[in-house]
Amino acid sequence: MAPRRSARLLAAGGLESATAQPSSNATKVKSGKVQSNGVSKARKTAPKAGKKKTTATSETTDAYAAIFGASDLKTRTKDAASSTNGTAKLESTPPPLDRPVDPHRTNAALLTPHGSSLVAYQPGAEDVSPSKTGLPRPTATTGNLLEKAVDHLISIEPRLKPLIDKHPCHMFSPEGLAESIDPFQSLASSIISQQVSGAAAKSIKNKFVSLFNDDVEDEVLRTLRFPTPEEVARCDIATLRTAGLSQRKAEYIQGLAEKFATGELSAQILLKASDEELVEKLVAVRGLGKWSVEMFALFGLKRTDVFSTTDLGVQRGCAAFVGRDVSKLKAKGGGKYKYMSEKDMLELAAKFSPYRSLFMWYMWRVEEVNVEALG
């Protein structure tokens, strides 16, 4: 995936209204009627104690989350089959609050298209033999992962401490790790957003979702329930294109749907795949390049050891962090790696493993990557 995507996606905040549903406006549908009391009762993501209000310091995470669907599931639909009189039925499934996690596996709770909420490690997994779980023994919990990661970064490079203190990272906080995503919805949304503005992506996504809810009278509800892979796989290309998708994107999304519908891809597979297996499986999907997969692994799956060398924002941050004059490097050009070579970036980041995701997030912060400009 071309490195310019970082500079374009910074304005992805335009997608937020299409995907993120603020908890204060969470809507429940019961017996075919919309009920709203202005306060979300969809699910509690973490204990109130110690909860911090999300601020502009997490704007980079919010921008990518808007595309990859990491924060739009305060409420969700159970299944097309559970609809009553064409009205989507919403429910919630809270994941365990303090569960075991591992840096090299998926730390987010993943939703299946049919309503199940899955996590890689069940509570108590730290006491179960890896030979039985098929996963490495967990090394942290959702409650202390961020603390462990931050301590590791600062122990390696104390200069990071002021940056970390200034910009708390919500993504790997207990609240951030409690958020659930639907991987099919996230990946399909990322394909929709490619090569178009945030406003255009929002419009296309709404029309796309409406194709599968055309029997729902309420306009808002019609754009809420994301279709299942089976529904999309059965839909012909010509119909998909009426949502504003190009021929190629329609084919990409239908192909992605077929992989989920046949079980070649699934939430269970994405939960347990190693970092290498994840990239291998997803770049095999037409329409998903390595950069898209890296961003999905980071902002969607909450994997902690992701590092993208082709992202221009990360390149700029790394170059500035080691003392290079970014403005002069930009003026000189230099192609794909004009700010820092891939080799130098990998060497710089290696010592921060297995928490390179957090290091990368702070490299965006070094150069104050502006979400408003992404997209």
Image: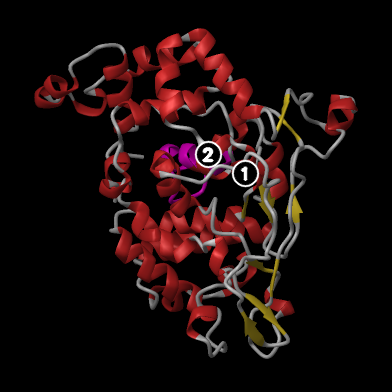
Image point 55% across, 42% down: which residue?
A: 52
Question: Magenta stretch mostly in which secondary structure?
Answer: helix
Vertical position of residue 177 compared to residue 353: above or below: below
Is residue 341 located in the magenta-colored stretch of the structure?
A: no
Q: Which residue is mark 2?
A: 170
Q: Which residue is mark 1?
A: 175
> In the rendering, at what x and y percent does residue 345 appear?
37, 17
Describe residue 375's horizontal placement relative to residue 70 as left or right: left
Q: Where is residue 86, by image quadrant? A: bottom right
Q: Where is residue 323, by image quadrant? A: top left
> In the rendering, at what x and y percent does residue 351 appear?
50, 10
Residues in magenta, as a range: 281-295
Is residue 285 located in the magenta-colored stretch of the structure?
A: yes
Neighbours of disc 2 within 10 Å: few (<14), some (14-19), many (20+):
many
Q: Is residue 352 visible?
A: no
Residue type at tag 1: Glu
Query: Which image quarter holds the N terminus?
Result: top left
Disc 2 + disc 1, Cβ < 8 Å: yes
Q: Going from the N terminus, do you reach mark 2 or mark 1 first? A: 2
> In the rendering, at what x and y percent does residue 164 appear?
45, 24
> In the rendering, at what x and y percent does residue 172 appear?
58, 35
The number of numbered discs placed on residues in the rendered structure image is: 2
